[in-house]
Image (cartoon, rainbow, N blue to C red):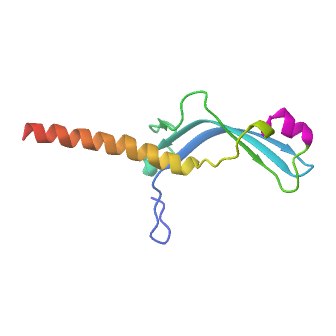
């Protein structure tokens, strides 16, 4: 188990990424897809770990980062003028997904036990 200064991992966030880089303005555009998470942090290197989807299929995260400026062909090509600037935390949404998934299962299990006893 990874442990540093009494912190321990709570969730694994997994996704695929398509990166694009344009040196003028140091522009980085990434498309993240297949976002999923797992609460099995002890199995970090297990390729067959159970993953829970964070977003619906075909929903992607588009990130546009730059230092100086965004060249017009990128701004208009991505229709950035028509998009609303927002923030999205893959980690934060993974934690919410895990809490809903694991918490929901525990809650259902507790109700089931109350009915038996």
**In this picture, which residue range is highlighted in magenta?**
72-80
**Residue projecting furthest to the bottom:** 5
Query: Which residue is found at the position 50% from the left and 46% from the top?
Result: 94
Query: Which residue is found at the position 84% from the left and 44% from the top?
Result: 21
Please tell me how many numbered marks the rendered image carries. Answer: 0
Q: Does the magenta stretch include residue 61?
A: no
Is residue 110 among the parts visible in the rendering? yes
Front-lying residue, 41 or 23: 23
Is residue 44 among the parts visible in the rendering? no
Query: Which residue is found at the position 93% from the left and 49% from the top?
Result: 24
Front-lying residue, 94 or 40: 94
Residue 34 percent location from the top left of the image: 59, 34
Residue 105 percent location from the top left of the image: 30, 39
Q: In which quarter of the image is the N terminus?
A: bottom left
Residue 5 percent location from the top left of the image: 49, 72
Left or right side of 48 for 19: right
Left or right side of 108 for 82: right
Q: Is residue 79 magenta?
A: yes
Query: Which residue is found at the position 80% from the left and 35% from the top?
Result: 78
Residue 31 percent location from the top left of the image: 71, 38
Left or right side of 4 for 33: right
Left or right side of 93 for 99: left
Q: Quadrant of the C terminus?
A: top left
């Amino acid at each position: 188990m990874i442990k540093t200064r009494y912190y321990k991992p709570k969730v694994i966030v997994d996704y695929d990424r398509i990166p694009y880089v344009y040196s003028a303005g140091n522009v980085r555009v990434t498309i993240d897809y297949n976002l999923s998470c797992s609460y099995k942090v002890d199995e970090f290197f297990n390729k067959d770990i159970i993953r829970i989807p964070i977003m619906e299929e075909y929903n992607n995260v588009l990130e546009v980062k730059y230092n100086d400026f965004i060249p017009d062909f990128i701004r208009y090509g991505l229709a950035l003028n028509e998009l609303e600037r927002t923030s999205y935390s893959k980690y934060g949404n993974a934690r919410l997904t895990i809490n809903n998934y694991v918490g929901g299962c525990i809650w259902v299990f507790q109700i089931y036990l109350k009915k038996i006893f």
